[in-house]
Image: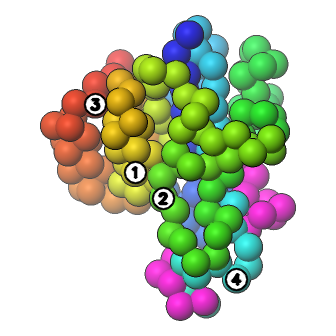
């Protein structure tokens, strides 16, 4: 069975401090895909402390976002409420946390860990579907890490949120050139 890696579909990237374009539509598309395809879901989440170095208040470039245990770090409730198969809803076993080291900017979820300490990069299947937020940052870097590990990647284009539509289009072109399959249906 193929995996679907759902990147950072968290409140702060949907309606919060770093709200992205097409994020509500992306979540709806991902739920539809989950309910209509035989996949195993792997969720990723930014999971920062208040002293994370990526925050502007701490000398970084981003507003405070996805602080562990806050509303901003919560996954969109649609994944719990609308995903039909219980095993494909978010849980401590299939949710991989990244960005926990205050000194390391971690866009890729490849080294994210679940509650048991298992790494996403060790758990993902040989062919992986990917969707989530934001295409130009965490989605892109996660896809590149998966490719570098020898996996085949299919990107769910309708299941992507983005910071800039122009940069989103540029990212899709770049990933396609690197061998990623773009699923646009």
Q: Which mark is residue 107?
A: 2
Contact (Cβ within 8 Å) of mark 3 with mark 1: no
Residue at the spot of label 4: 51
| Distance from the alpha carbon under mark 4 to that under mark 3 | 35 Å
Structure colour scheme: rainbow
Q: Is residue 142 visible?
A: yes
- Residue drawn at (34%, 59%), measured in percent from left and top? 164
Q: Mark 3 or 1 closer to N-term? A: 1
- Mark 3 Cα shell of 10 Å, populated few (<14), some (14-19), many (≥20): many
The answer for how far apart the CA atoms under marks 3 and 1 are is: 13 Å
Q: Are marks 1 and 2 in contact (CB under 8 Å)?
A: yes
Q: Alpha carbon of mark 4 to alpha carbon of mark 2: how far?
A: 17 Å
Residue 166 percent location from the top left of the image: 24, 55
How far is the residue under mark 1 from the one under mark 4? 23 Å
- Answer with the quarter of the image where residue 179 lies: top left
Q: Is residue 127 magenta?
A: no
Question: Which label number is shown at residue 180?
Answer: 3
Q: Say which quadrant the N terminus sits in.
A: top right
Where residue 30 is drawn, which disc sits there? none
Residue 23, how many percent across, how many down?
Answer: 52, 46
> Residues in magenta?
58-75
The spot of residue 160 in percent (x, y) is 44, 40
Q: Residue at x 72, y 22 (%)?
A: 88
Dot 1 corresponds to which residue? 141
For the residue carrying disc 2, how many other residues have a C-alpha within 10 Å: few (<14), some (14-19), or many (20+)?
Answer: many
Q: Is residue 10 visible?
A: no
In the drawing, does residue 137 fall left or right of residue 165? right
Q: Is residue 84 left or right of residue 40?
A: right
The quadrant in which the C terminus is found is top left
Secondary structure beneath dot 1 equals helix
């Amino acid at each position: 069975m193929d995996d679907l890696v759902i990147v950072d579909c968290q409140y702060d990237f949907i309606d919060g401090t770093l709200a992205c374009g097409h994020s509500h539509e992306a979540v709806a598309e991902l739920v539809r895909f989950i309910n209509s395809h035989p996949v195993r879901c792997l969720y990723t989440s930014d999971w920062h402390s208040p002293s994370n170095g990526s925050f502007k208040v701490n000398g970084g470039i981003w507003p405070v976002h996805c602080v562990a245990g806050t509303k901003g770090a919560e996954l969109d409730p649609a994944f719990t409420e609308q995903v039909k198969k219980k095993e494909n809803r978010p849980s401590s076993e299939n949710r991989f946390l990244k960005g926990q080291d205050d000194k390391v900017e971690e866009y890729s979820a490849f080294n994210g860990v679940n509650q048991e300490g298992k790494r996403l990069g060790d758990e993902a299947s040989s062919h992986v579907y990917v969707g989530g937020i934001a295409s130009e940052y965490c989605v892109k870097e996660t896809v590149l890490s998966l490719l570098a590990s020898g996996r085949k990647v299919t990107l769910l284009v309708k299941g992507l949120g983005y910071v800039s539509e122009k940069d989103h289009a540029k990212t899709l072109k770049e990933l396609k050139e690197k061998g990623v399959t773009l699923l646009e249906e």
